[in-house]
Image (cartoon, rainbow, N blue to C red):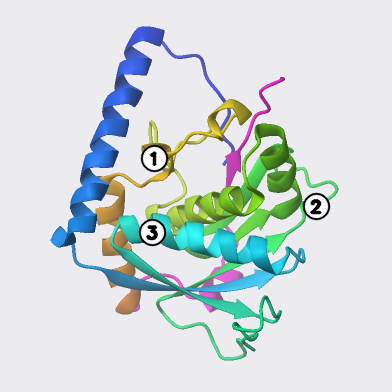
Amino acid sequence: MLFRDCPARSGHHAHITIAVFAVIALVTTTAMRAGGVSHVNLTVRLYNTAGVSGPELISARDTATSILGDGGLDMVVRHCGRTISTETPPDACSESLKSTEVVVRVIDAPAFNAAVNPDAFGLTYVVTATDRGWLATVFADRIERAAMRAGVATGTLLGRVMAHELGHLLLGSGYHGPAGLMRAEWPDATLPRTGADWRFSISEAARMHQAIESMSHGRLATETNLLRTGSDKLVALNAPLARR
């Protein structure tokens, strides 16, 4: 499902809603950091098919890990197939996917695909029956171009997109927040922002906790039944260009 910008019914009220959401997100993530929320583990198998440089991929990994960590989710990253540094040897990732593992692919966007919005930064495949998934894809080339336009570090933006798509795997296909990391639209003008613009809300974090706990008990879709499902839903994160 693709999402595009829609005019707010009231600009004044829209700004108030976003401002309040940002304050709540900042306060709640601060409380989580203080130790009030138990942490759960999520393992991510990261495949760097696009050949993103080691330093940028490490920056992306650290950015995504920090965002999820603020929500009480400890992300363990397995770098599958490629060496990113002498300190991080490649992982064969040859065994079957475990119940609390998901996959993130970093690829260049396809030259043409009618199902993918040309401005999308990434997408997830979600099983209709469970509204959850295990596979997320992010488009390195589009993210790099947007980062250059906005004057943002490519690794930082890549990590934010990764965290957003991981959010979709756990929160479901139809969900987008009014503000924060899970908002649907990321125009160039918003990309240099910091703080609560790139955090999960307390309710989002709680729902993600519940999803991971369900995964640990085998109640979510596995890669096998996902591949056999004929009614998978496609979810994309759109990034309309500021100049459009």
**Percent coordinates x, y for residue 125 in the rendering:** 57, 58
Q: Residue at x 35, y 25 (%)?
A: 18
Camera-nearest residue between 226 and 72: 72
CA distance separating discs 3 and 1: 14 Å
Label located before the other in sequence (2 or 1): 2
Q: Is residue 8 visible?
A: yes
Residue located beneath label 2 in the image: 110
**Percent coordinates x, y for residue 117 in the rendering:** 70, 39
Residue located beneath label 1 in the image: 195
Label located before the other in sequence (2 or 3): 3
Q: Amino acid at mark 2?
A: Pro
Q: Quadrant of residue 231?
A: bottom right
Dots 2, 3 in contact, CB < 8 A = no
CA distance separating discs 2 and 3: 28 Å
Q: Residue at x 66, y 72 (%)?
A: 47
Q: Residue 188: say if magenta.
A: no
- Horizontal side of 29 relative to 6 (left or right) equals left
Residue stretch rendered in magenta on the structure = 218-243
Q: Amino acid at mark 3?
A: Leu
Q: Amino acid at mark 1?
A: Gly
In the picture, the quarter occupied by the C terminus is top right
**Percent coordinates x, y for residue 243 in the rendering:** 71, 20
Q: Residue at x 77, y 66 (%)?
A: 51
Camera-nearest residue between 218 and 185: 185
Residue located beneath label 3 in the image: 68
Secondary structure state at the residue bearing disc 2: loop
CA distance separating discs 2 and 1: 32 Å
